[in-house]
């Protein structure tokens, strides 16, 4: 292994360590915040007997369970590849996202039912002042956590942290709705409590479905978006010795993307030149996708075969005549 390869491996290992550090710490932070929110909302529920506060408390109970699952999965996902898991353990992160989406949707259905009951049978609330102050505190701590999670997502694009952020972003909305409903209840509009619980539960169901779809796509090894596939195709074909590309396959897992392709090289080219061309193609891709794991298979083609144009559907494209 030359110095350049060693430097690239060290840089990739550094990025992986940074990814692990960010996502695991964010997981710990979310568990701690969830515990604080549960205590605060339980106090507010005892003081106010509010349906929307009960909805918010239920959401936080789901949050803490989901955050614990998320943390366990993230700690497993960042383990390095081993003999039994040659591609690493990154799929655990997508699995955590799928589990969280189930928590989100399940808890939101309960909230929806509870809100409808509150609309049908409104009741006056007690200790509104105390409930309002507890709700403001819960909103403030959730905002701090969501800001930190947004920073981690910009650094890592972690699916699990995105799912966790949805929990706490929804918690901010929940608390805002609770706050508004408490104010409305203070002025005598008792149905506001259940009305806001219904609206917020529908919003969270929508977000949970979105996270579930993204996690499921990762678990099923869906390819990269078409724009990325097209960019990879162009980067590989940019090497002069490469005449065409076929059977290009891509997938993503955690911070890594995996690329496999057959590259066509003229028969008259020496083995050393063909090998150097494959190295140059990998270097082109790594400049744009530094965490890519690339496997190229070289195939000989006729010397007079023209360079292949861009294909409308490069992923999995068929072979040309040899």
Image: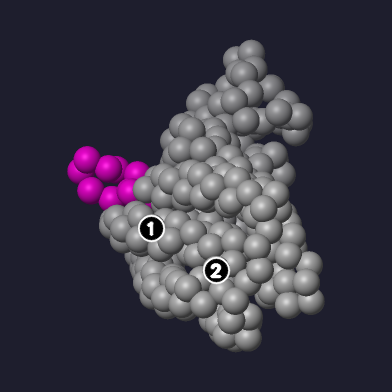
In the image, residue 320 above or below residue 148: above
Q: Residue at the spot x=71%, y=44% of the render? A: 227
Q: Which residue carries the number 1 mark?
A: 65
Q: Which badge, 1 or 2, comes first in the chain's sequence? A: 2
Q: Is mark 1 on a helix, strand or loop?
A: helix
Q: For the residues marked 1 and 2, what is the alpha-carbon distance in whole angstroms?
A: 24 Å
Mark 1 nearby-residue class (10 Å; few <14, some 14–19, many ≥20): some
Residue 196 counted in the magenta span: no
Q: Can residue 243 be seen in this view?
A: yes
**Range covered by the magenta-colored residues:** 81-90
The location of residue 117, given as percent across then percent down, is 63, 49
The location of residue 188, given as percent across then percent down, is 78, 72
The location of residue 97, given as percent across then percent down, is 47, 50
Label the magenta part by its dominant secondary structure. Answer: loop
Residue 222 or residue 167, whichever sits in front:
167
In the image, residue 205 above or below residue 66: above
Q: Is residue 152 visible?
A: no
Residue 210 or residue 269, whichever sits in front:
210
Q: Residue at the spot x=51%, y=38% of the render? A: 216
Residue lying farthest to the top in this orientation: 321
Say which mark, if any, is on residue 49: 2
Q: Quadrant of the C terminus?
A: top right
């Amino acid at each position: 292994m030359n110095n350049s390869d060693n430097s690239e491996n060290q840089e990739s290992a550094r990025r992986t360590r940074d990814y692990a550090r960010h996502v695991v710490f964010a997981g710990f932070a979310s568990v701690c915040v969830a515990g604080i929110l549960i205590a605060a909302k339980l106090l507010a529920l005892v003081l106010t007997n509010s349906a929307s506060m009960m909805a918010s408390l239920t959401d936080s109970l789901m949050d803490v369970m989901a955050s614990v699952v998320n943390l366990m999965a993230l700690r497993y996902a960042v383990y390095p590849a081993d003999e039994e898991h040659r591609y690493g353990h990154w799929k655990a992160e997508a699995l955590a996202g799928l589990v969280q989406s189930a928590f989100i949707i399940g808890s939101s259905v309960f909230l929806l039912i509870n809100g409808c009951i509150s609309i049908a049978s409104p009741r006056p609330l007690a200790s509104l002042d105390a409930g309002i102050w507890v709700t403001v505190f819960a909103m403030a701590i959730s905002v701090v956590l969501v800001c930190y999670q947004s920073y981690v997502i910009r650094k890592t694009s972690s699916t699990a942290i995105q799912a966790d952020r949805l929990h706490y972003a929804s918690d901010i909305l929940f608390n805002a709705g609770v706050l508004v409903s408490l104010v409305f209840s203070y002025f005598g509009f008792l149905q506001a409590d259940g009305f806001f619980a219904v609206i917020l539960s529908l919003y969270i169901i929508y977000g949970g479905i979105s996270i579930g779809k993204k996690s499921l796509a990762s678990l099923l090894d869906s390819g990269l978006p078409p724009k990325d596939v097209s960019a990879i195709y162009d980067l590989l074909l940019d090497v002069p010795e490469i005449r065409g590309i076929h059977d290009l396959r891509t997938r993503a897992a955690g911070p890594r993307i995996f690329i496999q392709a057959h590259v066509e090289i003229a028969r008259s080219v020496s083995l050393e030149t063909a090998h150097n061309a494959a190295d140059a193609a990998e270097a082109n891709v790594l400049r744009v996708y530094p965490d890519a794991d690339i496997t190229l298979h070289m195939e000989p083609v006729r010397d007079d075969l023209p360079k292949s144009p861009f294909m409308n559907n490069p992923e999995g494209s068929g072979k040309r005549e040899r």
